[in-house]
Each structure stands twice: as structure tokens, then as C-alpha cells.
Image (cartoon, rainbow, N blue to C red):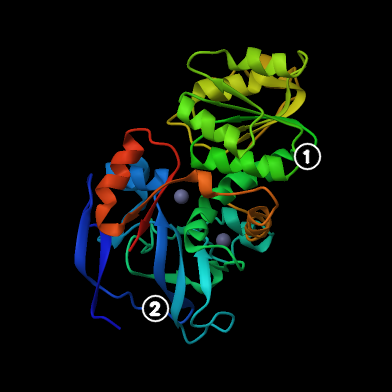
């Protein structure tokens, strides 16, 4: 194996990154595998890391570190204690690294482990030629799933988990936010048998993609009233379920008010700070269920994603915004900052 590798690195606390060509090939522990990275997608989290906001500063104490976590590749080395994976296996990676012994882990909820480590945030990640992956977080790719698709599964899983929680079969569903996760959630709603899908976003380009992914009705929430549009689409009753991917306070409140009595709102997107909600009118009197989801259920959601990928008529192709060589990281993040739709993927 080569002596050094290329990678995108956070060298010290503060905004920005460095593209390095002299990084050591990661050493692996006994319970890890070494993955040759084939594709890594850029996530909103990476944008927080680049900007070095409070979220990133509070979590990334382990500098310098290669970041990037939405990834897929091929195993080139396995640790001494790894028995379930072998060299040559094609994998994606679950970002949540659970401890295995806390209350959540021991009661079937390791995706919300109380001692969670994060691949590509607190631990070394995958904007590089090689990445160390905990064997328990490696997810074998189903046959026919490309590395680019594999790199989108982690983000897709967040949307799919929201769809699972909203239990959309036969229901009218509002999806707020048509970035990559929203688009994949819309496709998942379709495969899961939603009766009618209403999608909203501020950008018409993203709404066009939402229709491609299966939305029946799209609403530009900068120009139209989302609540009115949903009521018009449901004979005045309101949607059965709403999934918020946007994290926008305004969208969350419209989501609540778009629901019928007894409906459910699932929050996937992260708001910046606190949001004022009228609990009495918008939740209590109307018996609304409001819940969040964090990441993917391990590993039911991953299985669900693999099934969705192979469902007739479903394609992730429209969600790919661009594929760039690793050294063109700047171009990829420039595209995201300019509001370009779809997922940007880097190939080392
Ligand atoms: Zn992510
Ligand atoms: Zn745990």
C-alpha cells in the first residue's frame, strides 16, 4: 500500500479546511476495518464543520482530523477481531458509533446511544482515500447498489426513518424541505404507499425534483400559503402526517397547522435555536403527536433503504447534484452554498 494519502482535513479549531496529500494511511484497531473510499457525499454537518459553528466546536476535540461521513467503499484490511467482514466487501457506513452498554444500547435503541461517537466528526472520517470503520458500523451494500448510491444511504436513512415513524401508508403526507434528504423521503413515501404527497420548499428547482421523486402537489412556501394548499388538497381536513426536513421554524409551525386533528409531525431537520410553538392551539386541543428522529434505526432503516433502492420505479439518480474529484471540494461546497439542488459527491 502507498505511504501517504490525500484527504480533506480540519487542522485546527476555526473555520475552513486543508486539502492534504501527506496524510498517514489510518491504522485500524482490532474491531475495525480499513475501507478504500470510493465515494463520499457532502452533508449539512460538513458545512457546520467548515463554518465551525457551536455544534462543531463542541464536538470536534480530536484535531487534526479527516471529516466526511456519508460514504461507501471497499474493505482492504480487517482487524484481528473482525469475523463478519472480509477484504473485498463493498460497504457503506453508519455514522452513529454506539457504546453497546448504555441503557439505550441495551434496550434496542443503539441509534440514540448515550455515549455516541460520530464517524467523520468525533472520529476520523472519509473525505480521504482510506478510512478506518468500526466493524459494527459497516453495512454491506446490496448487489447492484453503486458506490455513489452507497454514499447517499446514510442521509437517505435519516429521511426514511422519518417516513417510517410517520407511518405513511394510505396517508396524505406533507414533506417540508426538498434538499437531498427531503427528496429521498418523498421517494420513500411513494414506495411505502402514501396516498398523496405534498412537498414544499423555497426553491422552484428543488420542487421540480420533488415532482420527479413522486410528489403529487408542490408548494413554493416563499410565495404560497402551505397550510391553505394542504387544506385544499385534503377537502379541508388537513394532512394525516407531516415530515419536516427543513428545520425552519416557520415550516414546522405550518406543518403543525397543516395536520388534521390526531395527525403526526416528525422532525428530521435541525432548527437553529428555539422555536415558539402554540402548544394549546396547535398540539394539545388537536391531539397532535410531535416527535423527532435521530439518524437511522440500526439496522432496520438500512434494510428498508436497500429495499426502497430496489423498488420498481424508484431511482436515486435525480438526487445526485454533482460528482467531483476530492481535490475539487471547493467547487462542491460552492455549489451547495449557491443553492444548487441535489447531493454533491466526492470521489477520491
Ligand atoms: Zn450526514
Ligand atoms: Zn450506548
Q: Report the number of numbered marks.
A: 2
Instruction: State the residue position of label 1.
Output: 169
Q: Judge: label 1 CB < 8 Å from ligand 1.
A: no
Position of 29 relative to 7 (above/below)? below
Residue 31 pos. (x, y %): 49, 78
Residue 127 visible in the shown view = yes
The mark nearer the N terminus, 1 or 2, is 2
Residue count near mark 1 (Cα–Cα under 10 Å), binned few <14, some 14–19, many ≥20: some
Position of 101 relative to 300 (above/below)? below
Q: Is residue 56 left or right of residue 74?
A: left
Foreground residue, 210 or 9? 210
Q: Is residue 137 left or right of residue 282?
A: left
Residue 149 pos. (x, y %): 52, 57
Foreground residue, 16 or 173? 173
Q: In which quarter of the image is residue 187?
A: top right
Q: Is mark 2 on a helix, strand or loop?
A: loop
Q: CA separation, marks 1 and 2? A: 43 Å
Position of 308 relative to 196 (above/below)? below
Q: Farthest residue to the right: give it.
A: 170
Numbered circle sitting on residue 28: 2
Residue 177 visible in the shown view = no
Q: Which residue is drawn at 30% across and 83% down?
A: 1
Residue count near mark 2 (Cα–Cα under 10 Å), binned few <14, some 14–19, many ≥20: some
- Mark 1 against mark 2, which lies toward the viewer? 1
Numbered circle sitting on residue 189: none
Residue 309 pos. (x, y %): 63, 55
Residue 139 pos. (x, y %): 57, 67
Q: In this view, does 339 lie to the left or right of 63?
A: right
Q: Residue at x 43, y 31 (%)?
A: 272
Q: In this view, does 119 lie to the left or right of 294?
A: left
Q: What element carries label 1?
A: loop
Q: Which residue is drawn at 69% across and 59% down?
A: 107
Amino acid at each position: 500500500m502507498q505511504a501517504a494519502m490525500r484527504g480533506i482535513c480540519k487542522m485546527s479549531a476555526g473555520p475552513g479546511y486543508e486539502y492534504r496529500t501527506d496524510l498517514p494511511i489510518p491504522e485500524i484497531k482490532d474491531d475495525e476495518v480499513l475501507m478504500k473510499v470510493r465515494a463520499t457525499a457532502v452533508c449539512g454537518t460538513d458545512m457546520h464543520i467548515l463554518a465551525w459553528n457551536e455544534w462543531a466546536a463542541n464536538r470536534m476535540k480530536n484535531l487534526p482530523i479527516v471529516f466526511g461521513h456519508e460514504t461507501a467503499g471497499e474493505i482492504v484490511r480487517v482487524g484481528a477481531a473482525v469475523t463478519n467482514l472480509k477484504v473485498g466487501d463493498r460497504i457503506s457506513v453508519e455514522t452513529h458509533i454506539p457504546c453497546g452498554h448504555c441503557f439505550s444500547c441495551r434496550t434496542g435503541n443503539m441509534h440514540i446511544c448515550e455515549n455516541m461517537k460520530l464517524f467523520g466528526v468525533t472520529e476520523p472520517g472519509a473525505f480521504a482515500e482510506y478510512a478506518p470503520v468500526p466493524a459494527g458500523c459497516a453495512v454491506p451494500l446490496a448487489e447492484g447498489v453503486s458506490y455513489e448510491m452507497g454514499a447517499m444511504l446514510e442521509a437517505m436513512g435519516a429521511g426514511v426513518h422519518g417516513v417510517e415513524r410517520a407511518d405513511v401508508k394510505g396517508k396524505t403526507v406533507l414533506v417540508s424541505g426538498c434538499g437531498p434528504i427531503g427528496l429521498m423521503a418523498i421517494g420513500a413515501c411513494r414506495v411505502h404507499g402514501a396516498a398523496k404527497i405534498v412537498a414544499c420548499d423555497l426553491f422552484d428547482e428543488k420542487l421540480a425534483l420533488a415532482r420527479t421523486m413522486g410528489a403529487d402537489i408542490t408548494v413554493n412556501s416563499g410565495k404560497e400559503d402551505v397550510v391553505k394548499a394542504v387544506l385544499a388538497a385534503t377537502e379541508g381536513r388537513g394532512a394525516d402526517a407531516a415530515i419536516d426536513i427543513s428545520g425552519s421554524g416557520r415550516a414546522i409551525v405550518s406543518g403543525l397547522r397543516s395536520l388534521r386533528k390526531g395527525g403526526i409531525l416528525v422532525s428530521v431537520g435541525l432548527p437553529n435555536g428555539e422555536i415558539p410553538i402554540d402548544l394549546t392551539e396547535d398540539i394539545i386541543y388537536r391531539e397532535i403527536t410531535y416527535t423527532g428522529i435521530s439518524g437511522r434505526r440500526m439496522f432496520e432503516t438500512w434494510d428498508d433503504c436497500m429495499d426502497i433502492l430496489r423498488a420498481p420505479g424508484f431511482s436515486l439518480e435525480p438526487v445526485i447534484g454533482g460528482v467531483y474529484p476530492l481535490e475539487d471540494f471547493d467547487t462542491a461546497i460552492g455549489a451547495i452554498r449557491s443553492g444548487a439542488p441535489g447531493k454533491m459527491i466526492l470521489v477520491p
